[in-house]
Each structure stands twice: as C-alpha cells, then as structure tokens.
Image: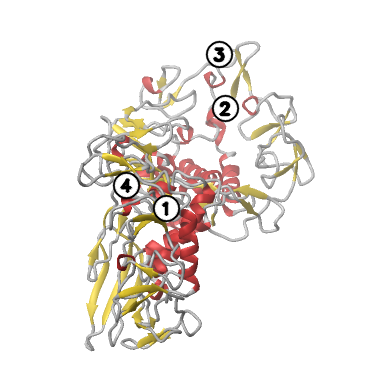
Amino acid sequence: MWLLCFIFTLTSASSQCSTYKCNTGYTKGECITESTGEDASIAYDQTLCYPEYVCTPSGSSTNCTLRQPSVNYPGEFCSTNSQCTSGSCDQATFVCKGLSVGQQCVNPYDCGPGMYCDSVKKVCTNQVKSGSACSQNNDYQCANGLICINLVCTSLFSVATGNQVDNDFVNDDTGFSTACTSGYAVYDEDNQFYTCTKAPHSENALPMKCTPGSKCVSSDLHSKNCTCGINQNGDSYCPLFEGDSYVQSMITSWKAIAQLNSGCNSYRRWGYQCFATQSIANQIQWYTWAANYTLYYNELYPLIQENQECTRQIETSSYWNIMAALSSSSASIQCPVYFCGTDKTNWGAEQCIFYEKDVLNYKVTDILSLNPCSTGTTCPTSQTSQNSTCTASTTQLSYAGDYCKKNEDCASGTCKNKVCSGAALAGACTNVQDCNPGLYCNTTTKVCDAQKVEGVNCASDYECLNNMTCNLGICIPYYSLPVGSVTNSVNSAGFSRACNFGFANLTTTTAPLKGICAKPPVSPSTGPIQCQPGAKCLDKTGTYSKICTCGLNEFGTAYCPSFEGDIYLKNSIIHMKTLMTKNKICNTESRFEERCFLRDLNNLETYYFYVTNFTMYLQLPALQENTECVKSIYTEDFWRWMKESYDHSAGIMATLASLLAIQVFI
C-alpha cells in the first residue's frame, strides 16, 4: 500500500509510563537523554536541535543529525536539479521531470505523473481509470485517487455498509478499511471475509485518560490498549476509534484530496511534496487530511496530549508541524531561513551564499546556506540575486578630518598626524566631503565655504554645522523642535531628527514629506515581539502601526520593528546629543560616522553607544537570533560595534546589552 508514513515514536503500553522533560536552549549534540530511576522508571530529557539539524527519536538517547535535503520524485516540487531523483527540475513549473510512456524504468517512482512502472515489462505505462481492470495489490496501476478492489480500479471509501470487502484493504488489528464508506469492516470468522459496517466510536469524551496496561473500550465493545503519552507527568490516554470525529474527518478529507492528486507521482500520491506545487486552497485540504491522518494512522493521538514545546518539536513534530503550517497557510509572506552551510556538494568556487527553495516542515521555504568568506574577502549581499561569491574586500576611503594611518587611507591622498587633510576655506572642491571640518562644498561655486549657523538658509544638513539639521530650509539644532512644530526632516516611518522626541506625524504621504512633531509611539511590551510576517504591529495605543518584518535567522521567525518611543531610539538620541558637542572635528559628511570618532577613544565609546542603539531602532528584526554565519555576512558591522563597545567599556556595555535584550545564538 502507498499509505503515507510519518516519523514518530510509539510508546507501548506498560504498567508505568516514561516521563519527558524539556531543557532550555539548543544543541547540535545529544537531543534526547535517557535515564533510569531506582524504581526502574525511564525518563527522557529533551533539548531542541538547531534548525539545521533534526532529532529523530530512537527510543533511547539520541543525537542531532544534519537535516538532509529533499529527495523528490517526478511530479513533486523542486527548485534545483539535485533535488530530483531524475536529476531534472523544470524551472518553469518547479516540478521534477520523469520518464515518459514506453521508456524503461527501474524504480516504481521513475515515471512521470499519470504513469506507473510496470513491474514485469519495466516500462512506464499509463495508469488505468475507474472501472478498468487492475492487478491485485497494485494500487500504483490505478489512477491516483483509486485503489484496486476485486481487480477493478475503484474510488477510495466507496464500498457501502453490508458489502463484502477484500481482506487486503482491511487492517487486521483495527478493522480500518480504505475501501469501506465508513472506514471500518468486521471479520466473519465462519465465512472468512470482511464486511463493511458502521465504525465504532469512543464511549467517552476525548481526550480520555486511562491506566497503563488497561483496555479502552469502544461503542461496539471492541477494545484497544491504553497508550502511554509523551508528557512530563507520565499520563496515558486512549487511542482513537474508527468512528471518532478525527478519523471520520480524515476520511472526508482523504476523498477530497483524491480529486486533487492526478499530477502526483503514483508512488507518493499523498505526499506534501506534490501538493506543495498546488494552490493554497489545495494545500489546506492536504494539511487538514494529514493532521488527522497522523493522529489516527500513526497513532499519535495519545502521544500529543500534554506535550511541552520541545516535545512538539521532537517526538510529535509530524503533527505539530502540520498544524503550524495549516495555521500560517493563508499568510502572504513566508520568511526565509539562514543556515550555516555544511553540505557544499552543489556549491560553486568561493560561494558564500547558496540559495534554494525546499520543503521544510511542510512548507516551501527559501533557504540560504551561508559560508563566511576568508580574511581579505567579503560576501556581497543583494536584493536581486540570493546567491553570492566571495570577492576581494574594499576599504572605504576616509574624508577630510577622519582618522587615518597612511596617505592611501584618505580620499585626498594626504594623511597628517593620523588625520586626513582636505581643502581649506575657499579651496576648490567637487564633492561634499572634500573640505576640511567646519566647511562644506558649495555645489554652485565649487569652493569650500564655512558651515552655516542656526537660522541661516540651507539646502541640506551638510551645509549646516555638525550639530544641526536643515529643516524647512533653515539650519536648526538636531532634536530641538517642540511638539506641534512643522518639519520636513522626516522619513516615511515618522522618524525626525528635527523633533525633540525624534518623531512627527506625517501630513503628506508623498515626497517631499512633511510632518508635525508629536510624542512618539511605544511598543506594547519590551523586548523583541514575534509576529506573522506582513501583519501589522500596533503600538501600545493601537494608533500607530508598522509591518512585521522577517528576521535573518535559522528559524524563519519575524519580529515587530521598534517604535520611535522605545528605548533604542531614546538612547541613541541621548548619545547623539553628547556627540554633537564633540563632532566639530568631523567632516560634514562624517559627523556621525565611526571613521571620525576613531580619533578619540573617549568619543568613540559614546559613538558605539549611539550607533548600536540607533541600529537596533532601525533593524531590530534583522538582529534577532543571528548565527555566527549571519553575523559574518549580513550584520557584521553591528556585532563588531557591540564587541568594540565591550572592549572599551565592558561594565557599561553589559548594562546596554541587557537593555537591548538581543536574542543571541552563538
């Protein structure tokens, strides 16, 4: 039979059930630790594997193993040729190609959808339709929604109550039958055949606890063994009977997806890999069926009761992953996952990002495998192409007033006393950064002019003194406008370096943006808030919103961005105001850049306080749960700033780190 199989642990009935406990954190080592107590009781300590690894329960102590890529049959989802057993993925449809009618086949899954591999002739042959003759025990020969009953291809669950059914379509232990409309048949001892009949149901409300080693009795007095659960209390539960709602719902859903799988491989006609290429509505049908299938056919119903979170992700993950996929199936955005690449079989030379789509926890997922570059090279990241190859590192030239070690560090080509030299007052210039500190390049006259003081007309911040912004064409101090003032120094999120709270309510939604300074919105709780990607994240009052944003992590989790009234922007404003009293030595373009403050370690410490807080405000979702690979490729500057901060002021930065509440995975 082609019945779908899931990995699970069956806990057999005994006089005493095992207990299960969750440990905190993640591991790449032992994920299940078995121990035996003095009373011979067995306990299991469970630790989640990092997402790039899996924990496959073995009934004893178990280690994490690397997650293996999908191996997909013709008709199933693919994004690369290596994912297909045929070695060929149709890039137009993202479906594995297979052999055609008449071609020689070896394995039962070699042929394309609508065909099967004839076991005698060893050639791909068209499946037969309903009512056509078939060989006994050869369901592959029948079209995907059919089974071979009495040598005729027949629909699933189509034999009416009271009719005889072939023994091959009845489970001898439970009486479950894929042929009977009820899903159940009883055995006639005298005549030695099965007859479809009404399915028995549990006598009591579910879930029902029971005593290990006892019997659970159904409405027709049939019985099943009480089954140990997988929980911290050692409780046990009755399994499902064939007439229970879960099983009957499974049958209904099974008949529904039997109308949807004509494009699936005959060998794995019920697998998610085929339905992954179909519409969301069809996938929901599959999830609904598969969830109930795991509860009944894989006997998981007693095992899922009282599950702790780690148990859901280890012992009973086949059910809970399906339920998670079902609950998020309507989401318009699916976050990618970022793994530290281990299997580089299909990688190019010096490749640092390998991108592919694959089925992960019953969802088609963007997977980016990462391999940090060696010293002297860097991994470019791009929005247009997910793959990337290491390239030679380049260093940004420092501007006039910036720190330098040698002439080659400076855009001007001159480094004096570890400071880059630039054009003097009235000197010739081309770009804004060409002039010495205290000056800016007048783009009309192409000469260096003195920066403008408060109240003078301006066209950009760079024309104003380093502690000022250009608001409505006039130089004013940063963060100086009271609530109610008008500003055009504002971005689409409402962030404004002109307003004293750093926030303005937008009065226009198209460029040029304008707003009115206001008290800033605050997140409803402290710390990172997980959310559904693409959903709205509301502030504490429910008035303001931002879009939930995918992180750069191996879990595929998304987070709410920080609001302007949160600790991160508030801290950055405090430290920026301190820098405003120190940055006269900076080039107008480097007024809040590390390359200027490298000149003074005391100022540098303040700069790191400022830039780490400001980066958390701007990129909070991207900085959560970063692995070392992500840190090296995507968020290197932030984590370097954090490290530099610790090196300069370990005690103070410990306090900062606690305020930031960053989730760090080393």
Residue at the image point whose x is 31% and y is 82% from the top: 17
Quadrant the N terminus occupies: bottom left
**Which element carries disc 2, helix, strand or loop?**
helix
How dense is the environment of label 4, judged by Cα within 10 Å: few (below 14), some, or many (20 and up)? Answer: some
Image spot of residue 150 (x, y percent): 33, 60
Mark 3: amino acid: Thr
Image spot of residue 517 (x, y percent): 74, 44
Viewer-nearest residue: 206 or 417: 206
Going from the N terminus, do you reach mark 3 or mark 4 first?
A: 4
Mark 1: amino acid: Gly
Viewer-nearest residue: 407 or 2: 2
Q: Are marks 3 and 1 in contact (CB under 8 Å)?
A: no
Q: Nearer the viewer, mark 4 or mark 2?
A: 4
Q: Nearer the viewer, mark 3 or mark 1?
A: 1
Residue identified by numbered label 4:
70
How dense is the environment of label 2, judged by Cα within 10 Å: few (below 14), some, or many (20 and up)? Answer: many
Residue identified by numbered label 2:
588
What whole-number distance in Å separates the C-alpha atoms at marks 3 and 4?
A: 56 Å
Going from the N terminus, do you reach mark 3 or mark 1 first?
A: 1
Residue identified by numbered label 3:
430
